[in-house]
Image (cartoon, helix red, strand yellow):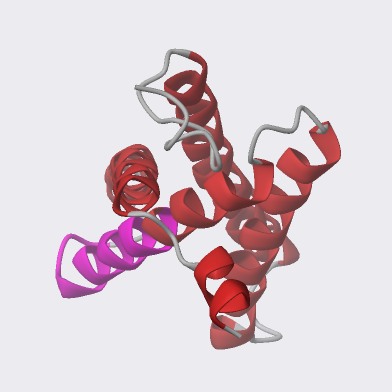
Amino acid sequence: MSNASSSVRLSAQERIESVKAGLIAAIAGGLTGFFLGILKTLFGEVTLGPELILSIAITTFCSFLFGITYRYIVRQDANPHLRSGALGAFALVRGLSKIEATWSNALPMMSYVDMLGESFGIFAIAQLTLDFAITHALVKPFGSAERLP
């Protein structure tokens, strides 16, 4: 039993790398959400206020979780299906949740397409930023933190 539980434990270095991945994704996703929010205020779709701030905060937190999860999913594997699957799963969960929360027959269908597109855009930018960070050794892939100095 001791061997099984010790093989599942993450080292402090692995946890640090995961938090770094989460922070990088949170910054990328949060900034993307912020700029999208500013654009929406310029076009009169939303107003500056607590609703916009909450939306940006939730986007930032979701991006943080995406970053941590993405690092575990892709590990050291170059499989593009893992990368796109992680992106698609997070984007669909966020986008479909927004649709469910705002569903109304009075809203045009393009509003819902916009919600999904926004989610895919946010997580795609977070993914590209993470891939850049991993490629340039700013974040180590999962499983390599203890082997690399």
User: Is residue 58 one of those drawn in magenta?
Assistant: yes
Name the foreground residue: 54 vs 28: 28
Name the foreground residue: 77 vs 104: 77
Residue sticking out furthest to the front: 2
Q: Residue at x 69, y 52 (%)?
A: 86
Q: How many marks?
A: 0
Quadrant of the snapshot with the N terminus? bottom right
Residue 96 position in % (x across, y down)? 67, 73
Compared with residue 46, is residue 50 higher up or lower down, i.e. above or below? below
Residue 90 position in % (x across, y down)? 62, 60
Residue 67 position in % (x across, y down)? 46, 49
Q: Residue at x 63, y 57 (%)?
A: 91
Q: Residue at x 58, y 51 (%)?
A: 72
> Does residue 23 appear to the left or right of 115 in the view shown?
left
The answer to which quarter of the image holds residue 121 is top right
Residue sticking out furthest to the top: 136
Compared with residue 68, is residue 80 higher up or lower down, i.e. above or below? above
User: Is residue 112 one of those drawn in magenta?
Assistant: no
> Does residue 114 appear to the left or right of 84 in the view shown?
left
> Does residue 98 appear to the left or right of 45 in the view shown?
right
The magenta segment: 47-63
Asked whether residue 128 appears in the rendered view, the answer is yes
Q: Main secondary structure of the magenta part?
A: helix
Q: Residue at x 47, y 38 (%)?
A: 126
Quadrant of the snapshot with the C terminus? top left
Name the foreground residue: 48 vs 122: 122
Asked whether residue 45 appears in the rendered view, the answer is no
Residue sticking out furthest to the left: 49
Residue 95 position in % (x across, y down)? 61, 65
